[in-house]
Image: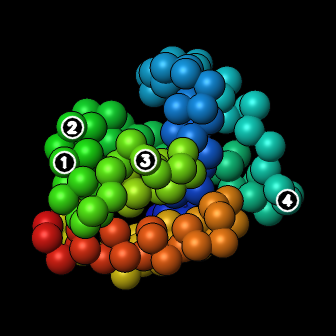
Amino acid sequence: MGEQNNFPAARLLSFQVYFYANQSGTKVDLNDSSFLEIRETIETPDEEADKLNQNPEVLILAKHILSYLFENDQVIRECVNNSLHHKNLDKLSKTDFALVMLGTSELIQNKAKDSKSIINSYVNISKRYGSKDSYSLINAVLDNVSRSV
């Protein structure tokens, strides 16, 4: 499986870890066992997702995604707030918050290259984990971000 095929799984794992950490107040240290402990506590909905989460390439990509987010949190928050138009980042559901932060982080890091793929991945995750309208918000915010980076 090539690196490109691992990105959707890495994005899902990044979302699960980031969401869990925010929900539980757990600090994630990507260089120690806390990342693996959090990953172990997350229930995957099917065997295929579980196998992907065991893939070392997926783990590396997920850590890379999260590392950039943690290192650039303030810049990412500002970018999201600028793209929310009349909404406040702190008023979003925890699911939507996690998705826009992760998506924005990747869009900034990649300078909006592959923006369609990045946005589609997070929209798909929002359809699975968010409210019935989450996908629309995630799509709109990430589309705004991709135009501004």
CA distance for labels 3 and 4? 31 Å
CA distance for labels 4 and 2? 35 Å
Task: Answer with the quarter of the image where residue 80 lies.
Answer: bottom left
- Local packing at callout 2 (Cα closer than 10 Å; few below 14, some 14-19, many 20+) is few
- Across and down, in percent, residue 126 comes to 59, 65
> What residue is drawn where x is 62% and y is 25%?
24
> What residue is drawn where x is 75% and y is 58%?
49
Task: State the residue position of label 1.
Answer: 78
Amino acid type, label 3: Lys
CA distance for labels 2 and 1? 6 Å
Amino acid type, label 1: Glu
Quadrant of image for the C terminus? bottom left
Amino acid type, label 2: Gln
CA distance for labels 1 and 4? 36 Å
Task: State the residue position of label 4.
Answer: 46
Q: Nearer the viewer, residue 55 or 46?
A: 46
* Front disc: 3 or 2: 3
Q: Nearer the viewer, residue 71 or 7?
A: 71
Marks 1 and 2: in contact by CB < 8 Å? yes
- Across and down, in percent, residue 74 comes to 21, 37
Left or right: 106, with 43 as reference point: left
Task: State the residue position of label 2.
Answer: 74
Which residue appears farthest toward the front when viewing the image?
86
Q: If you read the primary sequence from the N terminus, does the residue marked by circle 3 or circle 2 appear first?
A: 2
Quadrant of image for the N terminus? bottom right
- Across and down, in percent, residue 13 comes to 59, 49
Q: Please tell me the numbered disc located at residue 91.
A: 3
Residue 65 appearing in the image: no
